Amino acid sequence: MGTGVKEKPRRTLRPTKPFVPDLVYFEPDALNYPKGQHIMEWVKSKDIPYRMTSSHNRITNLPGETDQEKYRNAKRTLVVGVRKTLKFDQSKPSAEYAIPISTGCMGHCHYCYLQTTLGAKPYVRVYVNTPDIIGAAKQYIEERAPEITRFEAACTSDPVGLEHITGSLAELITFMAGEEFGRLRFVTKYHHVDPLLSLKHNGHTRIRFSINSDYVIRNFEPSTSHFEERIEAAGKVARAGYPLGFIIAPIIWYDGWQDGYAELLKRLADTLPAEAAKDLTFEMIQHRFTKTAKNVIEQRYPKTKLEMDIARRKQKWGRWGQFKYVYPDEQQNALREFITERIFEHFPEATIDYFT
Ligand code: SF4
């Protein structure tokens, strides 16, 4: 093939099960909404312990002796609440706005920026007042019409991994199908897409899968669906007529990265059904971190192999009001050029949205 990619024996992996929390909190007001009641029935049917809380922003008494234990328990705690702020954040470069249906994630990706952006609230929050959220989205669409307004549903969470509990993506997809000037997009590391396949979407929702080299997935992405599951799900999504995309993120420089990323693109091309290769988009995000993130990651995942040596990075001013550390230009260019070539080698019709 000219890439020098060696075939590695595939590991047999256990299927990744849908998320079932260990503990659930409800805001009393959430039970006034059909989705809140529905989640309560699900919680009872699964015999999951639950408690009431005055606010989804104030969960303080989570079990655990150490901070690390508390963090792990928080990631297995679901909080069901009402979204009060209906002003949407911007979501550059992938969309105009972030649409808030959930916050937090049960995954344990070492590099995940939610570790710092969510601060002391790493538990998983879902919002039951989807009609209000959809109403706000409609206003944003109308303000910009006839320009297209894109909404990203996975800025602060991985909503596909929560869809079996909430059904919120199905509501957004169905709403957006009827919006001439509205588009929805979200990205996931989970493969539980079956509830979305039969929906009427009108091509207005782009589903993207976050993918990476085997080395990165194995070392840095615990508690997410494995590569084969994600690719199989991508095939299903494409067969259901959804526009499809991939985010390669974070792109990591490690010994053997060329082989790793060449193999990734080859496996993708070998596994993806032919119809999925049409209208494919790729987004590429190099690994970055802040000093705050580095400290938090080293506390929470003390054995991580994630390289965060400030001396080997380039400093860049970040929108969170502190410096972030990216790869020096030479490394960035090498990563971008190599992966871009592999993408076009296997998917000549694909679009690359950005490298950042
Ligand atoms: S799946 Fe996404 S949102 Fe969840 S921990 Fe991993 S990077 Fe973060």
Image: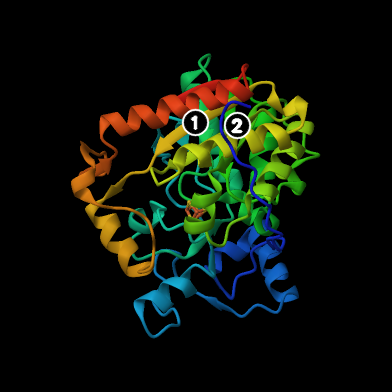
Q: Position of residue 9 (x, y in %)?
A: 68, 52
The furthest residue to the bottom? 65
Dot 1: within a 10 Å radius of its alpha carbon, few (fewer than 14), some, or many (20 or more) residues? some
The furthest residue to the top? 146
Q: Secondary structure at mark 1?
A: strand
Q: Position of residue 168 (x, y in %)?
A: 64, 48
Q: Secondary structure at mark 2?
A: strand
Q: Residue at x 77, y 32 (%)?
A: 273
Q: Residue at x 63, y 39 (%)?
A: 172
Along the line of sight, the residue nearer the viewer: 265 or 190: 265
- Give the amino acid at mark 1: Glu
Q: Position of residue 30 (x, y in %)?
A: 57, 62
For the N terminus, the image quarter is: top right
Along the line of sight, the residue nearer the viewer: 117 or 278: 278
Which residue lies under the disc numbered 2?
245
Q: Are marks 2 and 1 in contact (CB under 8 Å)?
A: yes
- Give the amino acid at mark 2: Gly
- Mark 2 to mark 1 CA distance (whole Å): 8 Å
Q: Residue at x 65, y 77 (%)?
A: 48
Measured along the vertical axis of the image, is residue 323 above or below residue 339? below
Which residue lies under the disc numbered 1?
283
Measured along the vertical axis of the image, is residue 155 above or below residue 44? above
Dot 2: within a 10 Å radius of its alpha carbon, few (fewer than 14), some, or many (20 or more) residues? many
User: Is residue 124 visible from the viewing direction of this image?
Assistant: yes
Q: Residue at x 45, y 82 (%)?
A: 63
Along the line of sight, the residue nearer the viewer: 144 or 98: 98
Q: Position of residue 216 (x, y in %)?
A: 49, 50
